[in-house]
Image: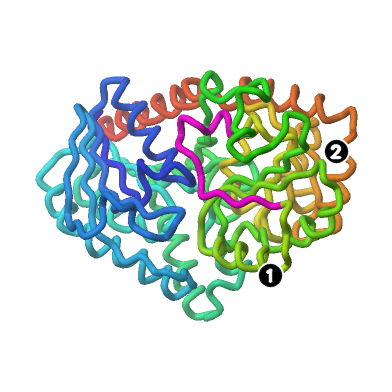
């Protein structure tokens, strides 16, 4: 197959959709397919263009069957609803030269990855003009999330964005997403079940796996082997709602056994660091992230993992970090609304403790309970087994590859 992937997020970004987009492209290339990518210079999660790409304009990178066409884009220092829209529009506008070039090439199939939602418009136009199947893959439901979080308050604008989203959902050859909760929301937007495909995020369970504590990154932080490490690793942005975590850290400051680590970057990082200093919290450690090669050692050092989201997010986004935590055999506490699809799946399979979002007291209580609970090892064992059974990369992408072949065959017949 000759495939065109369109997304602003791609490797070397190691968190969020950029990681999965890059791994998808590399997997398809290993299968012998030619993959062209139209993307931006990497900027996430720091919201700052990576050092090696700064001051560069349009750039083409070639790696065998993989061609990456990068474009500059506006990256706001402090993302808001308005600046995010400008950021996304700048990517669409600056990528136009590559789309003009694409008109002179023949692709078998197009894949665009949301967010941003508008990323589906140019692939739709191309697919219509060239009669090429178009897969609209959704990593999170951006318009619903913006409405829930209040990132966009203008009702007219929200209505317009919803109409554009619905248009793309109705006109893509296939709509895919990563969780059952998102599937329910998407089908509720009048997408027919036969046009939906489940494409969950995957994890390399051979690379990320449980490790002895002596082989983890505890020594890098100065922790003892018997310290209780509570780890939040991931994006520090609006959807996560990690602000309340500092209240938990403060309330547990008297317990010298417990060390909190906040590992990651994002729009709220500096505010969290400043607030922790203001409160004089000596039991919390901030780090900006580790290399991908160190990820197994980072995850394995945690006694307890925290997966935190704001209210209303449980069926709109699925924390990508959760699959890696499970692969590492991690015991996690996850914030999710009661009876949401995410909460029900985690509880039914005894994978984690689930607490209500934006409730620091419930989060603190769960940490205290889990520290000394005999269920800690059960959660670790169950999580590792579930990751192996459900998140294997080859198993997931084999099915996706079959879908792509079927779409191409159906298109050629019609």
Q: Which residue is mark 1?
A: 278
* Numbered range of the magenta stretch: 284-298
Q: How much space separates mark 1 and mark 2, taking CA atoms? A: 29 Å
Rendering coords of residue 378 (x, y %): 81, 25
Q: Which residue is mark 2?
A: 370
At label 1, counting other C-alpha atoms closer than 10 Å, the crowd grade (few under 14, some 14-19, many 20 or more) is few
Residue 144 visible in image: no
Q: Residue 342, located in which quarter of the rendered image?
A: top right
Please report the residue visible at 18 percent of the width from the left and 35 percent of the height from the top: 62
Q: Is residue 386 above or below residue 5?
A: above
At label 2, counting other C-alpha atoms closer than 10 Å, the crowd grade (few under 14, some 14-19, many 20 or more) is some
Please report the residue visible at 84 percent of the width from the left and 52 percent of the height from the top: 364
* Disc nearest the viewer among 1 and 2: 1
Q: Residue furthest left?
A: 104
Rendering coords of residue 159 (x, y %): 50, 74
Q: Residue 301, located in which quarter of the rendered image?
A: top right
Q: Which mark is residue 342?
A: none
Whether residues under marks 1 and 2 lie with C-beta atoms below 8 angstroms apart, the answer is: no
Query: SS class of the residue under badge 2?
Result: helix
Q: Is residue 371 above or below residue 7?
A: above
Residue 372 visible in image: yes
Q: Nearer the viewer, residue 172 or 221?
A: 221
Q: Is residue 139 magenta?
A: no
């Amino acid at each position: 197959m000759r495939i065109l992937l369109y997304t602003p997020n791609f490797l070397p970004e190691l968190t969020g959709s950029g990681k999965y987009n890059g791994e998808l492209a590399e997997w398809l290339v290993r299968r012998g397919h030619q993959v062209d990518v139209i993307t931006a210079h990497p900027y996430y999660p720091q919201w700052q263009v990576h050092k090696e790409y700064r001051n560069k304009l349009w750039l083409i990178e070639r790696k065998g069957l993989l061609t990456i066409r990068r474009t500059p884009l506006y990256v706001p220092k402090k993302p808001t609803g308005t600046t995010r829209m400008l950021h996304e529009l700048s990517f669409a506008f600056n990528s136009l030269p590559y789309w003009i070039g694409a008109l002179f090439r023949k692709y078998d199939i197009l894949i665009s990855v949301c967010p941003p939602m508008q990323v589906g418009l140019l692939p739709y136009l191309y697919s219509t003009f060239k009669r090429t199947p178009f897969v609209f893959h959704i990593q999170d439901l951006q318009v619903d999330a913006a409405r829930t979080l209040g990132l966009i308050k203008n009702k007219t604008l929200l209505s317009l964005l919803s109409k554009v989203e619905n248009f793309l959902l109705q006109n893509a050859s296939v709509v895919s997403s990563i969780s059952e909760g998102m599937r329910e929301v998407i089908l509720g937007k009048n997408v027919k079940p036969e046009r939906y495909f489940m494409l969950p995020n995957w994890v390399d369970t051979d690379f990320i796996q449980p490790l002895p504590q002596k082989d983890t990154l505890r020594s890098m932080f100065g922790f003892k082997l018997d310290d209780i490490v509570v780890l939040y690793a991931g994006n520090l942005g609006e959807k996560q709602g990690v602000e309340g975590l500092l209240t938990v850290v403060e309330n547990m400051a008297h317990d010298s056994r417990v060390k909190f680590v906040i590992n990651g970057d994002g729009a709220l990082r500096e505010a969290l660091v400043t607030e922790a200093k203001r409160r004089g919290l000596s039991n919390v450690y901030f780090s900006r992230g580790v290399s991908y090669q160190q990820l197994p050692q980072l995850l394995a050092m945690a006694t307890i993992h925290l997966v935190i989201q704001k209210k209303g997010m449980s069926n709109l986004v699925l924390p990508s970090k959760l699959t890696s935590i499970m692969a590492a055999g991690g015991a996690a506490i996850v914030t999710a609304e009661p009876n949401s699809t995410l909460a029900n799946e985690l509880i039914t399979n005894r994978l984690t403790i689930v607490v209500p979002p934006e409730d620091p007291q419930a989060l603190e209580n769960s940490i205290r309970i889990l520290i000394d609970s005999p269920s800690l090892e059960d959660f670790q064992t169950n999580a590792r087994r579930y990751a192996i059974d459900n998140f294997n990369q080859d198993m997931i992408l084999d099915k996706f590859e079959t879908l792509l072949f079927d779409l191409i065959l159906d298109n050629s017949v019609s």
